[in-house]
Image: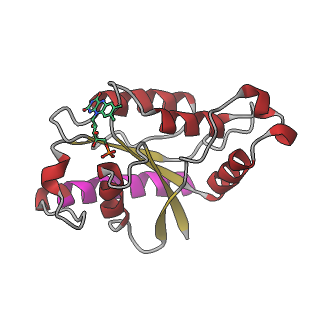
Amino acid sequence: MTKIGILLGSLRKESFSKKIAANVAALFPEGMEAEFVEIGNLPLYNQDFDDENNAPAEYTTFRNKMKEIDAVLFVTPEYNRSVPAVLKNALDVGSRPYGASVWSGKPAAIISQSPGNLSGFGANHHLRQSLVFLNMPTVQQPEAYIGNVAALLDENGKLKDENTVQFLQTFADAFVDLIKRHQA
Ligand code: FNR
């Protein structure tokens, strides 16, 4: 079983990112299981905690969880033209202690969304920049920018726009191909 961890850039209960992610989770084939990974409980990264004996329990739990995960799907809004702090914090926590990053070599994919037209482009690309440094091979094409997100979902959070479902299926297929290439 290949495990895909979903990390969200929003803690909001009714988050559009979460709803889009739940729709995408259903598009992976048998043998690939997607699960949400909690990041909202992580204390702000502090380098003083790099000493394992000093690390908050939440850091250790998160790092151990990510070690079990084979690939990472990021679904995020844009905050002030960049990556929401909660998601950047999770990247930072997972990247340390130095030499023990949980990210290196793990395939990744990014979806950004917004209720407006710009679709989280800034967050998508700032996140992509961090993933380059973290050595995460990331789906290049198709790029996934979901704009006007509120209009695409029904009252149960299910995608009602068939074109978007088809697009996200193509995106999920590209991610699956990338994961398989890295497992070969
Ligand atoms: C936003 N929003 C926003 N939208 C955008 O397209 N570009 C931006 O730079 C910002 N900046 C921003 C900052 C902060 C602090 C908030 C709270 C919101 C709006 C944002 O896209 C919208 O609230 C989304 O619905 C957030 O995603 P979730 O929580 O629905 O997943």
* Camera-nearest residue between 45 and 71: 45
* x 19%, y 48%: residue: 149
- Residue at x-position 16% and y-position 63%: 154
- Which segment is the magenta one? 165-184
Rendered-image quadrant of the N terminus: bottom right
x, y percent for residue 119: 23, 37
Q: Quadrant of residue 127?
A: top left
Ligand 1 rendered quadrant: top left
At 20% from the left and 42% from the top, the residue drawn is: 115
Q: Position of residue 50 (x, y in %)?
A: 78, 33
User: Quadrant of the image for the C terminus?
Assistant: bottom right
Q: Main secondary structure of the magenta part?
A: helix
Q: How many marks?
A: 0
Instruction: Write down the quadrant of residue 83 in the picture.
Output: top left
Question: Is residue 177 part of the magenta span, yes or no?
Answer: yes
| Residue beneath the point at 49% across and 63% down | 35
Whether 23 is drawn above or below 56: the answer is below
Q: Is residue 148 left or right of residue 98?
A: left
Is residue 21 highlighted in magenta? no
Q: Is residue 128 left or right of residue 153?
A: right
- Residue 119 visible in this rendered orientation of the protein: yes
